[in-house]
Amino acid sequence: MQAETRSNAARINEPFAAAAKAPPDHGRETGASRTPDRADAASRTVELRIRRQDGPTTAPYWQSFRLEARPGANIVSLLMDLREHCVTASGEPVDPVAFEHNCMEEVCGACAMLINGVPRPACSALIADLETPIRLEPLPKFPVVRDLMVDRAQLFAQLKRVKAWIRIDGAWDNHERAPRISPQDWAANYLYSRCMSCGCCLAACPQFGPDQAFVGPASLAQVRLMNAHPTGRHDKAERLHAIMADGGLSDCGNAQNCVRVCPKEIPLTTAIGELGRQTTVQALKDLFGGR
Amino acid sequence: MTMLGLTRQPGFAMSASIQNPHFLLRRLHSLLGLVPVGAFLIFHLWENSQSRFGATHYNEEVVGALQGLNYLLLLELFVIALPLLFHAGYGLLIIRDGQAEPRRYGYLRNWLYWLQRISGLALILFLLLHVGLTRIAGLFDPSISADLFSHMQQALSQPLVFALYLIGVLLAVFHLANGIATAGIVWGLTSSAEAQRRFGWFCAGFGLLLAALGVHGLLGFLIAPGAGGGA
């Protein structure tokens, strides 16, 4: 949704920007005699530098491409255009660049990659806002499948590890009303429900990596969400025990990059602070008894 | 599931927090850093800030009073040395992992994450030098502990030693102040981003005060009245 609003905003602003830039006496001039700035905004030749990799175990290499970016284009649409004529800047035809995409509105998380060194979803990265040449790299910390495509199975393994789900109270009518949640709690919980498992927070986390056991901020935030749920709270102790084991919450180094790069602006560090409090209480219960 | 997922299989085992020592060890590392190690740093800088009153005051009221404490060796061992050794040793284990990339992610907290690790490493080296030059050297040469003021004054009047001590004191103060700020998050004292930011600035203020106290103590050895004599 954010991608849509951003690109709409860009489109809406275009005429105003053009009007502001046009010299007052030449207002009637059109087409070819427009200022160069205006031509750039309509369509622009961009240089793409892509870190490619033919397979999970082969060595990565860089390739440059030069192509027209249509107005309002984003990285995914640019890669789609590139797929039609995948010719490098030096004129060599090459295999199309492999990449993942799905929703095109920043809700599925499939297209996350490193864009100019920053982990973010490609669909909401507008070409007009990016510095050129644009550098594209696969999302770090995850094994590369091919080119910009990574295997994020790790993320789902971590969600399973922390029991990031809610057990239903039964598949039959239990003659109880739906649980009540205060609007305040609902508003706070909603922030965490927006996680789309894109993996940007994990890419930026210094404590997360293939050789490290840390579960990562994304799954921790889901523990915060599930523990607050009226039905999910019954499994709170089990989830807390899961994040108190090796590679759990206490492996967080408080670098707080996660919250800075999260495209959905999820308060990940707040979740980590709240879980710090919950695990402190849980440890006291474990030590001295109590539920 | 990928091969990476499988390598982490041990982490999937469910265990209560006190049956798995990981959580307790991490929290112990955090706790010992605050009390007694951090508390001792404050006490230590406070005591040494009295260096400007000169050799007599320092040797009698500061060093002498401490040397007269009952069970001094046990206190030194259990309140300072062992907690410090655990904090340093376990800290070394913790910082094996992790790549900060402070250039790619130039956010303040990421820089502090990186500096906390660097300062921890540097402090281990500094403390080996510092404890070796004072407490350990004093065991072999009784004249050092008899007149610690002159010993420190001679050492600190060499620019290289003074620079090392200045860096050591500032790094120790930084490591404590930043450690208190992150301990607030770890223990769950501060949860919201605003609370973490507010407490972060509070710790920065505390760090500046403590740094001033520490630097004042170092300078005191050089500006004390009757320096060298014992007036």
Image: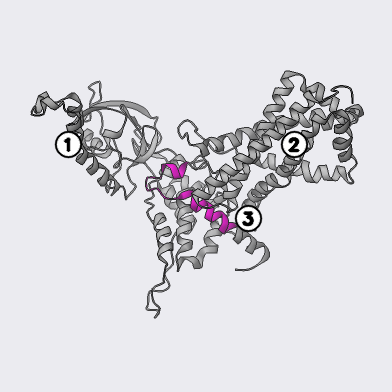
Q: Is residue A227 left or right of residue A20?
A: right
Q: Is residue A258 magenta?
A: yes
Quote the CA–CA distance across marks 3 and 1.
Answer: 63 Å
The type of residue carrying mark 3 is Asn
Magenta stretch, overall SS? helix
Q: Where residue B62 appears, x then y in whole percent?
A: 85, 36
At a point 73% along the width and 40% down the height, the residue shown is B42
Q: Where residue B208 appears, x then y in whole percent?
A: 64, 36
For the residue pair A238 and A291, the one nearer the viewer reads as A291
Q: Is residue B111 left or right of residue B30?
A: left
The type of residue carrying mark 2 is Leu
Residue for badge 2:
B45
* Label 3: element kind: loop
Residues at circles 3 and 2 in contact by the CB criterion of under 8 Å: no
Query: What is the number of the mark on residue A15?
Result: 1
* Label 2: element kind: helix
Residue for badge 3:
B20
Which residue in the rendered view is the most extreme toward the bottom? Answer: A175
Residue B228: name its quadrant. top right
Q: Is residue A17 magenta?
A: no
Region in magenta: A257-279
